[in-house]
Image: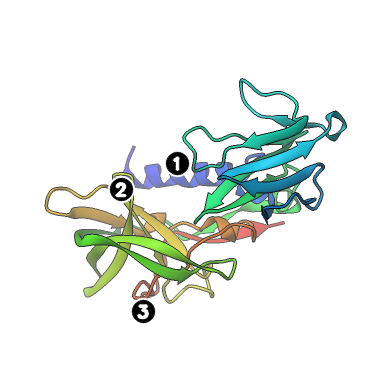
């Protein structure tokens, strides 16, 4: 399989993942929890957060259940571990999936509904045609120590983004740099360019292969992809950090979510 065929396979899998029953298009709410029990919109039971856990008080008539091999009805007071725990726990209400999350010490419950209007209206992801010249050699230089930088997020709050180092590369003969994060052994970045907010969504994500011992890797902008908040407003996505807004028009990668 050549590079263009691999890209097409990746793009097809991206669209399939987006439109999955509990994929990003199915997200209908992210409810931040308080220390006191409260009713959440459209959900039975009472929900709150304490001691790093999502807590729920429900009756048998509410129809809530724990997902997984050990799952069962949620009756009385129950607890769910968030996505940052070693063994997260999910709940369900019929086909609706309830996902506890933790972000900077705050707990929330995400609601994924397969019948979400955005999922039913999904018509694909608009992309630029594959072009090999947008895959460029790059060199990663790590910082002496990781830097936590406060950046705005899609929900209006500032949150820390941990930056691991600087990526240097050239586009159309001009030098550019980006600051990037570690993502396992790989690198990831949040970028904008001259197409952002015009032909493409207001920012995009990129992922790069692990650099070699000399820091060499490849930045393939054909795989610049839409952040989760392009599919649903209830996601928390970081905006590009300072310096990650390229002046060049990156006419490669994903553009926008298409709706019928």
Left or right of 145? Residue 196 is right
Q: In this view, does 133 lie above or below 124?
A: below
- Lateral position of residue 129 relative to residue 212, left or right: right
Residue on which the image places disc 2? 186
Sequence-wise, the earlier of marks 3 and 1 is 1
Q: Report, in whole angstroms, how far the alpha carbon at label 2 lies from the one at label 1.
A: 20 Å
- Residue 240 visible? The answer is no
In the picture as drawn, the residue positioned furthest to the right comes out as 61
Residue found farthest to the top: 69
Does label 2 or label 1 sit earlier along the sequence?
1
Q: Mark 1 points at which residue?
A: 9
The residue positioned 68% from the left and 29% from the top of the image is 66
Q: Where is residue 111 in the image (x, y as percent from the top left)?
A: 69, 46
Q: Mark 3 points at which residue?
A: 247
Q: How many labels does the image show?
A: 3
Contact (Cβ within 8 Å) of mark 3 with mark 1: no
Q: Residue 64: x percent and y percent?
A: 77, 33
Element class at badge 3: loop
């Amino acid at each position: 399989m050549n590079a263009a065929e691999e890209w097409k396979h990746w793009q097809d899998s991206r669209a399939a993942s987006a439109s999955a029953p509990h994929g990003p298009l199915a997200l209908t709410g992210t409810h931040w929890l308080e220390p006191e029990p409260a009713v959440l919109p459209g959900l039975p039971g009472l929900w709150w957060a304490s001691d790093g856990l999502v807590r729920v008080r429900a009756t048998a008539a509410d129809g809530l259940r724990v997902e997984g091999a050990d799952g069962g009805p949620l009756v009385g007071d129950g607890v769910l571990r968030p996505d940052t725990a070693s063994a997260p726990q999910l709940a369900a209400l019929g086909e609706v999936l309830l996902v506890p999350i933790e972000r900077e010490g705050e707990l929330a419950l995400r609601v994924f509904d397969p019948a979400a209007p955005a999922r039913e209206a999904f018509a694909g992801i608009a992309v630029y045609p594959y072009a090999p010249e947008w895959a460029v050699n790059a060199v990663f230089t790590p910082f002496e120590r990781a830097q936590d930088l406060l950046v705005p997020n899609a929900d209006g709050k500032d949150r820390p983004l941990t930056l691991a180092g600087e990526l240097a590369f050239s586009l159309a003969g001009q030098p550019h740099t980006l600051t990037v994060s570690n993502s396992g052994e790989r690198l990831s970045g949040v970028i904008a360019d001259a197409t952002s907010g015009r032909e493409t969504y207001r920012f995009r994500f990129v992922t790069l292969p692990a650099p070699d011992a000399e820091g060499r890797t490849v930045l393939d902008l054909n795989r610049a992809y839409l952040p989760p908040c392009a599919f649903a407003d209830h996601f928390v996505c970081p905006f590009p950090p300072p310096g990650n807004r390229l002046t060049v028009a990156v006419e490669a990668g994903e553009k926008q979510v298409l709706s019928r």
